[in-house]
Image (cartoon, rainbow, N blue to C red):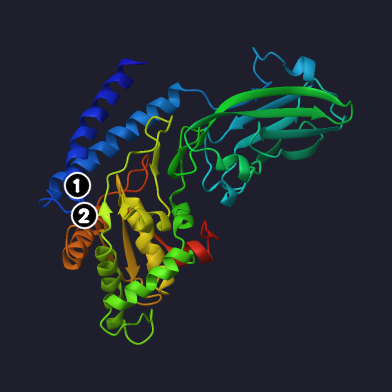
Amino acid sequence: MTDELVELRHQEYDVGQQVARLRQQAFGNGGPDPQWGDLAEAERTLADVRGRRRALEAKLTGTGRVLDTTGPNALLGADSTGLDAVVRLRMSCVPTAICHLLDATDHPLVSCRIKQSSQEPRNQTRRVRVTCRVEGYSAPAIDTVELTDRKPRDFDLLPSFFPAELAAVSELTAATVSALVEDLDSAKVEVHRTSRIWLLARTTAPLWIHDPSTGGWIDLTRYLGAFVTPNAPDVMSFLRTVAEKHPEGRLVGYQGSKELVEGQVQALYEALKGIGITYVNSVIAFDPEDGAASQRIRLPRESLRDRSANCIDGTVLVASLLEAMSLNPGIVLVPGHAFVSWETWPNSAEWLYLETTMIGSHGYGDARRRGDELAQVYEQLPQQAKDPPMFRRWSLRDLRALHRITPME
């Protein structure tokens, strides 16, 4: 570790402590009035230091190679295989809760580049099969290529995981990814290598995942939409309690007029307050990646059952009820926190915000004001090129229609 990296990590830790204190004041169950100016400045400083630290680490670390026959020190080089083969790991942590929604084009587990070595005859054609699997947890992902004229072939692979095996992943679990290259013409195994990866717990909501091949970060925040479950029986049943809190005893979604919408949201808030939903600052999920963002999360039915919720729990719970009421909710993410929003009228692009951690301790008006303040502060913060966005609002309408992110249950 270089002196520069040591200094950046110390800076990140010190600024992170300051940010954590200011965030707690801003997010923590409606405490004293936050120091918004100090928080905004500290967030900018932390994003800058973290971006420089990540950039330096990307230069100093490897490139996520699982298999490589191109280097001079490769155990099986071009002399023995006749192939230049590189398989790079793209996710060192597999988000087991939502991996069934991922595809190889956008979120591969490995990326491959295969070509004939320069020592092979130019007119020789070779058929090569590449197989990738996570031992004991997935079916094989297979691609077969025909190599000619020493032209490289690039492709991505993502195995299909076994639901029954993933259901048992209740904590961070080590697993093995294997990469196999076979020459189909000679029926020979050219190269077979393995690498260690991590399976995130099924109760973990991944926000960003590290790509070891580039040093960059993969944004998975849109997949929080899978935890929004408007059709779950417990959610649908709770709508009756919500309707009973409405002055007219009914929920009409966007029917009628724009002025009627917020009254339905307030009825939802009062219904959750009435059953004693309490804010609980749950533990962050264990994650092996330094700086990777993930969070333990309850499904909405579990929050209704337990009468407790952290910020993400409360956000997906309220979003589920809003969507079940035929409104368009939004999941809002800022550094270290999540809260909920809703579109005031279909396709209006006008959003209102609600701080769900205040349900157990404050009235609807206070929670609305705090949500609006949070949105205003973080929307104005400049975006950092090497850091996840400071403000992200995912419209459930867009997640369902454009990204095909379906409810988990």
Question: Image point 35% across, 82% down: which residue?
Answer: 250
Question: Image point 70% across, 27% down: which residue?
Answer: 85
Q: Earlier in the sequence, mark 1 or mark 2?
A: 1
Q: Quadrant of residue 277?
A: bottom left
**In the image, is 386 to the left or to the right of 357?**
right
**In the image, is 374 to the left or to the right of 306?**
left
Badge 1: few (under 14), some or many (20 or more) residues near its Cα, within 10 Å?
some
Q: Quadrant of residue 359?
A: bottom left
Residue 377, disc:
2
Q: Looking at this view, is 138 or 113 the one in front?
A: 138
Q: Amino acid at mark 2?
A: Val
**In the image, is 385 to the left or to the right of 232?**
left
Residue 277, disc:
none
Mark pair 1, 2: CA separation:
7 Å
**SS for dot 2:** helix
Question: Image point 22% across, 39% down: which residue?
Answer: 20
Label pair 1/2, CB-CB below 8 angstroms: yes
**SS for dot 1:** helix
User: Where in the figure is residue 147, as x and y percent of width and height?
Assistant: 80, 34
User: Where in the figure is residue 59, as x and y percent of width and height?
Assistant: 44, 25
Q: What residue is shown with label 1?
A: 40
Q: Is residue 10 visible?
A: yes
Please determine whether, in this image, residue 127 is positioned above or below residue 369: above
Q: Is residue 338 visible?
A: no
User: Where in the figure is residue 216, as x and y percent of width and height?
Assistant: 46, 36
User: Where in the figure is residue 185, as x and y percent of width and height?
Assistant: 89, 30
Q: Amino acid at mark 1?
A: Ala
